[in-house]
Structure formats: structure tokens, C-alpha cells
Image (cartoon, grey):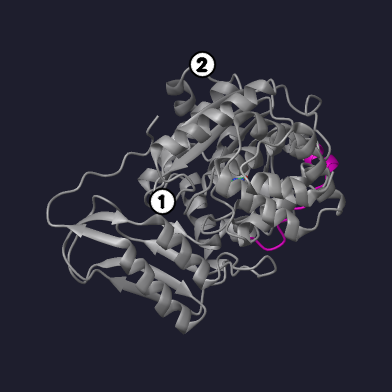
């Protein structure tokens, strides 16, 4: 078999066999298949798709490209969550400590930014010292001792996805149902999750723009999970506008901390409570959504969710004084409040444009080797449904470069649309 023939077959809309997929993935991990062939393969899949059978084979091949974790000696039930990616999505930072504070030990391996969508690891690295490279042994020990772990994908877990993810980020090959489904599910399977909450985003700032596409992705992932013997719940959530108000690494960490302390934007808090409730049900700590939600609310209200976040940061070497005093996070050189150009109701805050503008500022990567600037981004003051007067603050830009600030400001101004009549707020969940 030759990698090039597999690429050609997919380029010509052929259906790959399990053996061909395994050959390609194993070769990619061993280094026999170079990055340029893997990128061409990814593009062929983006353009021509895969059948559910091919996607399942790709998922299993990627999951088995490394170790499969067994967490049974660390937790009674391994529950995980995963978002399909979006703008301002800092849900994991709030949900993980919240459910851990409710007595459900959770360990998660998160990813970096992907295209215009932010990544939990990049956000966490805003906290000086925070380690995202725990070994599998460290992961298990911390899960057992502290009940909460949030780290990067260790090199021995689904390494095929680790390599492919970094390539897709910079080769225009993110938007693809089979690639997203296999990327998410291979990690969950490899990381030993027995039950998984999938937060599948839909809208202008999601990889799946339409509800129909998001539903196909969600169903496919649920099916793959079931085939692998896992219990899976998929939520379809809105990503037409950014989630919460902060977009950008340390700005999002600060918003997640605010939310853990009982504040934070209402939409983000509500989103976190709902995801937490589903995790608590899967983890058999709650019987109903109502009960799960009440437990999560209590953990936030009594400070135990925030305390779990401190425990997490400390356990992973992070400087917890930043968590206790968020004014310690370095502030960008230029902080500009942008005023609304008109009055009316906000009818759109195009999430993808905001995500792309954040990448322009340096919050994400244009090339694989690009460093991330943790201090830059936006805080939105008005979201869909809010009334605004001319001159009222619309959003704040945090930038370290004046030219980039100007470019990002125009892009985010262009992301806003207004209506003369009242606009209802966007739903948080569709299904
Ligand atoms: N999250 C992932 O882990 N992979 C994707 O491809 C998209 C979102």
C-alpha cells in the first residue's frame, strides 16, 4: 500500500477500506507518512467526505494509535465532556470544577485553538506555571487524589489526532463532519471515558453552521460512541454569537473565574449549569436535570466550585495568586472601548468574525509554530437582543499592536448588526 494511492482514492471520491485507513493513520504516527501527505488526505476528506463506516474506522484507528486509558482504579465512573468548538467557549473551565465539587471526579484532556475557535489549553496557559503536559500516570494520580484534572492530550493518547489537529488548524481542513467526529471521539475513547456529554455547537461561529449539519455530526458521534460501548449525550447549542462576553485567552479565564464565583454573564452561566447537570446525571450523582442543576448552583453559591478550580490550578503547578487576584493577569498595551455607531437592538454579533478578529490580535495561530498572545481579545458589552444607544460601549478591544487593533476593531464592528425593532435573545440550546 502507498499513502499517495489512498489520497488519490479519496480525492476521486472512493470509499476507503479499514485496512487503508489503518495503514494511513499508523504511517502518519510513525512518521512514514509526512505532514504534507496527511494535509492532502485531510483536504480530500473535507472535499469528498466519508461514509459513517469510514468515519468509525478512522475514529478507531486514531484512538488505537496510542494507549487506551483505563480509569477504573481512579474513579467509579469516568465522565467526560467535549465541545465541537466555538468562540468564547470557556465552558470546560467552569464546568469541570463545578461537577468535581459536586462529588463527580473528572479528568479531561483538552485541545488548543483550532482555526477561529479558541482552545482550552491556550486559555489555561495564561495562568503562569500551569502545566498542560501531565503524563498519564500524573493524570491518574491527580484524578484520584484531587478529583479534577484538566490537561493536554498526553503524547501517548491518540497521537494521530494530536498531529492531525495541529495540521488541520493551519491547512483549512477543520470544517468536516468526519474529521471533527473522529477527532473528538477518538480522544474520548482513548481517554477512558465511559460516559460523554458532547456540546455540539451550531451557528455562524461553529464549524457546523446549520442545525441540520450539527445534528448529523451529533448523531454520528453518538453512534460512534455507542459502537465503542460508551454512553453519550449530545446537546445542540447556539454559536451564532460568542458564548459569554469574553473572547481571548486570559480574558476568558477571568470570565470563567467570575462565573465560578457566582457572577459572569447570564448566558454563559446558564450554559454551564445545563452541561454540568447532564454530566452529573451521566455520572450517577443526580437523577434529573433539575437535581443536577440544583447541585451545580449550590457548588457555585457555596464557593466549593471555585475552591476546586484553585485546587486544580495548584495541583498543576499554576500560580494560584492569579486566580485569587485576577488583576495580576498581564493587561494588553492598548485597551480601547468601542462605542456603538447607532441606536437600536443588537440583531447579530457574528461569532466567526469575532473569532477571526481575535486570531488577528494574536489570540490564536495562523501558522503551527505561531506563539499565542494570552492578553489580547475582546469583551463584548452588548449581545443579541440588547438595546443600545449611540456612543454607548459596544465592546472593548485588548491589543498589543496598534495596527492589529484597528483591523480587529473594524472586523468586530462589522460583526454587529442592529435592528430598529426589538429582537429576542438567541436560544442557548436547540435540542
Ligand atoms: N474539537 C476537536 O477535538 N476536534 C475537532 O476537530 C473539532 C473540535
What is the number of the mark on residue 244?
1
Q: Can residue 102 be seen in this view?
A: no
Q: Where is residue 301 in the image (x, y as percent from the top left)?
A: 46, 37
Q: Can residue 63 be seen in this view?
A: yes
The quarter of the picture where residue 390 lies is bottom left
Which of the two residues, 109 or 106, is positioned nearer the viewer here? 109
Which region is colored magenta?
126-141
- Residue sticking out furthest to the bottom: 402
Q: Position of residue 355 (x, y in %)?
A: 46, 60
- In screen coordinates, is 398 left or right of 330? left
The quarter of the picture where residue 237 lies is top left
Q: Any atom of ligand 1 within 8 Å of the CB at mark 1?
A: no
Q: Where is residue 22 in the image (x, y as percent from the top left)?
A: 79, 38
The residue wearing badge 2 is: 287
- Residue sticking out furthest to the front: 12
Instruction: Judge whether residue 40 is colored magenta.
Output: no
**Residue name at image x 29 percent, y 58 percent:** 382
**Residue name at image x 24 percent, y 68 percent:** 340
- In screen coordinates, is 142 left or right of 108? right
Amino acid at each position: 500500500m502507498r499513502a499517495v494511492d489512498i489520497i488519490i482514492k479519496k480525492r476521486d471520491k472512493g470509499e476507503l477500506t479499514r485496512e487503508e485507513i489503518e495503514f494511513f493513520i499508523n504511517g502518519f504516527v510513525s512518521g512514514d507518512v509526512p505532514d504534507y501527505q496527511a494535509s492532502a488526505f485531510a483536504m480530500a476528506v473535507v472535499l469528498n467526505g466519508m461514509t459513517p463506516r469510514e468515519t468509525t474506522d478512522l475514529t478507531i484507528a486514531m484512538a488505537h494509535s496510542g494507549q487506551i486509558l483505563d480509569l477504573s482504579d481512579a474513579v467509579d465512573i469516568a465522565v467526560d465532556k467535549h465541545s465541537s468548538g466555538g468562540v468564547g467557549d470557556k465552558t470546560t473551565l467552569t464546568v469541570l470544577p463545578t461537577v468535581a465539587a459536586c462529588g463527580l471526579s473528572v479528568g479531561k484532556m483538552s485541545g488548543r485553538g483550532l482555526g477561529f475557535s479558541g482552545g482550552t489549553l491556550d486559555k489555561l496557559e495564561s495562568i503562569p506555571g500551569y502545566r498542560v503536559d501531565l503524563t498519564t500516570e500524573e493524570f491518574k494520580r491527580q484524578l484520584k487524589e484531587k478529583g479534577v484534572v484538566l490537561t493536554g492530550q498526553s503524547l501517548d493518547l491518540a497521537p494521530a489526532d494530536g498531529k492531525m489537529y495541529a495540521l488541520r488548524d493551519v491547512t483549512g481542513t477543520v470544517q468536516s463532519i468526519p474529521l471533527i467526529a473522529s477527532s473528538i471521539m477518538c480522544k474520548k475513547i482513548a481517554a477512558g471515558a465511559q460516559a460523554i456529554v458532547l456540546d455540539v455547537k451550531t451557528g455562524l461561529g461553529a464549524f457546523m453552521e446549520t442545525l441540520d449539519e450539527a445534528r448529523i455530526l451529533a448523531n454520528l458521534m453518538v453512534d460512534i460512541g455507542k459502537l465503542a460501548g460508551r454512553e453519550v449525550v449530545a446537546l445542540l447549542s447556539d454559536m451564532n454569537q460568542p458564548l459569554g462576553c469574553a473572547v481571548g485567552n486570559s480574558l476568558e479565564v477571568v470570565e470563567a473565574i467570575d462565573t465560578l464565583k457566582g457572577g459572569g454573564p447570564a448566558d454563559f452561566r446558564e450554559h454551564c449549569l445545563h452541561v454540568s447537570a447532564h454530566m452529573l446525571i451521566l455520572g450517577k450523582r443526580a437523577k434529573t436535570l433539575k437535581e443536577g442543576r440544583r447541585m451545580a448552583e449550590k457548588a457555585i453559591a457555596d464557593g466549593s466550585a471555585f475552591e476546586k478550580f484553585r485546587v486544580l490550578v495548584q495541583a498543576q503547578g499554576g500560580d494560584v495568586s492569579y486566580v485569587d487576584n485576577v488583576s495580576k493577569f498581564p493587561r494588553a498595551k492598548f485597551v480601547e472601548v468601542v462605542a456603538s455607531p447607532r441606536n437600536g437592538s443588537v440583531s447579530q454579533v457574528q461569532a466567526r468574525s469575532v473569532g477571526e478578529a481575535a486570531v488577528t490580535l494574536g489570540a490564536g495561530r495562523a501558522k503551527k509554530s505561531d506563539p499565542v498572545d494570552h492578553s489580547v481579545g475582546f469583551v463584548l458589552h452588548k449581545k443579541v437582543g440588547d438595546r443600545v444607544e449611540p456612543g454607548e460601549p459596544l465592546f472593548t478591544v485588548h491589543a498589543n499592536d496598534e495596527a492589529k487593533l484597528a483591523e480587529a476593531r473594524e472586523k468586530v464592528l462589522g460583526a454587529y448588526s442592529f435592528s430598529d425593532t426589538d429582537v429576542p435573545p438567541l436560544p442557548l440550546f436547540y435540542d
